[in-house]
Image (tube, rainbow, N blue to C red):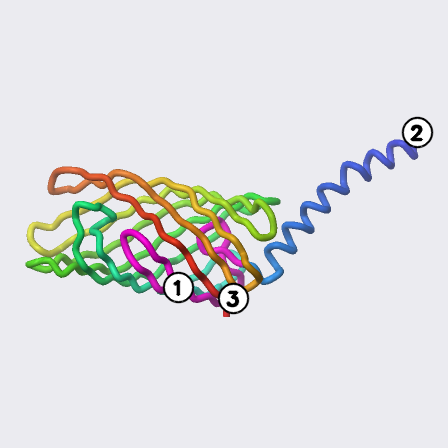
């Protein structure tokens, strides 16, 4: 009877240990995430490019700790708040701050805020301060593939031209990442949702971008 109880205990404990080791090796083997629920990891640096609508974005991200990282992103914009009816050329710069607040065997939850500036070459120029926030639920399908679902609240306060206009809207959408190897990462990111303006009116905006990233 004691031997049987011992074998049952081993059978119960072994899968948990195997899952924990799999999770640990996935996080600690040099792999990283830019679209999912995990941060880069302490001391990890990555350069990235995001190509699609409503911008082409070049970024650099530095892992500050096991649970948070910081970066800089330069945007070549051609859609105001992702609205296809508002196609204007512009420039933007953001400082993304990301933190993993929950981590289990395969599930992770990340929060982020991306304060920055935007300017569009309208006449007169459209200039504003952006401070989008969001939450991402990530799932490590295996060592190579991460899938996630994000809920974002893009917010921009345009101070010119007068009067001041505040744009905000809840966005939702999935993303996927694939590790070609420990350094090269490819992915696809999406968000969809309404955009509401304090000056009146609303529209529909979206984001669809291909991600290419390289761990240095």
Q: Secondary structure at mark 2?
A: loop
- Looking at the picture, how far across and down is residue 189, in whole percent? 40, 49
- Looking at the picture, how far across and down is residue 32, in whole percent? 52, 58
Q: Secondary structure at mark 3?
A: loop
Residue reaching furthest to the bottom: 216
Lower sequence index among marks 2 and 1: 2
Q: Secondary structure at mark 1?
A: strand
**Is residue 13 magenta-colored?**
no
- Looking at the picture, how far across and down is residue 192, in whole percent? 32, 41
Q: Residue at point 67% right, 48% down? A: 20
Q: Which residue is mark 1?
A: 71
Crowding at dot 3, Cα within 10 Å, few <14 / some 14-19 / many 20+, comes out as: some
Crowding at dot 1, Cα within 10 Å, few <14 / some 14-19 / many 20+, comes out as: some
- Mark nearest the camera among 3 and 2 is 3
Lower sequence index among marks 3 and 2: 2
Picture quadrant of residue 149: top left
Q: Relative to 181, does residue 136 appear above or below in the rendering?
A: above
Q: Nearer the viewer, residue 151 or 209?
A: 209
Residue 78 is left or right of residue 183, and the answer is left
Query: Which residues are the magenta region?
Result: 32-58
Q: Residue at point 56% right, 59% down? A: 31
Q: Residue at point 82% right, 39% down? A: 10
Classify the position of the N terminus by image quarter: top right
Q: Which residue is mark 3?
A: 44
User: What's the mark number on residue 1?
Assistant: 2
Residue reaching furthest to the top: 1
Q: Nearer the viewer, residue 91 or 196?
A: 91
């Amino acid at each position: 009877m004691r031997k049987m109880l011992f074998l049952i205990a081993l059978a119960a404990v072994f899968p948990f240990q195997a899952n924990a080791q799999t999770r640990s090796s996935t996080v600690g083997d040099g792999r990283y995430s830019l679209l999912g629920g995990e941060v880069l990891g302490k001391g990890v640096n990555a350069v990235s490019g995001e190509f699609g609508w409503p911008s082409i974005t070049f970024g650099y991200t530095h892992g500050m700790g096991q649970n948070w990282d910081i970066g800089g992103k330069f945007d070549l914009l051609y859609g105001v708040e992702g609205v296809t009816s508002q196609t204007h050329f512009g420039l933007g710069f953001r400082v993304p701050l990301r933190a993993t607040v929950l981590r289990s065997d395969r599930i992770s939850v990340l929060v982020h805020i991306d304060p920055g500036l935007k300017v569009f070459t309208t006449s007169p120029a459209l200039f504003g301060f952006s401070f989008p926030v969001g939450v991402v639920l990530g799932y490590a399908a295996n060592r190579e593939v991460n899938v996630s679902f994000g809920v974002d609240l893009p917010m921009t306060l345009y101070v010119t031209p007068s009067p001041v206009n505040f744009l905000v809207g809840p966005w939702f959408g999935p993303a996927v990442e694939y590790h070609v190897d420990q350094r090269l990462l490819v992915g696809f990111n999406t968000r969809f949702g309404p955009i509401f303006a304090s000056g009146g009116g609303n529209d529909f905006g979206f984001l669809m971008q291909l991600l290419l990233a390289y761990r240095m």
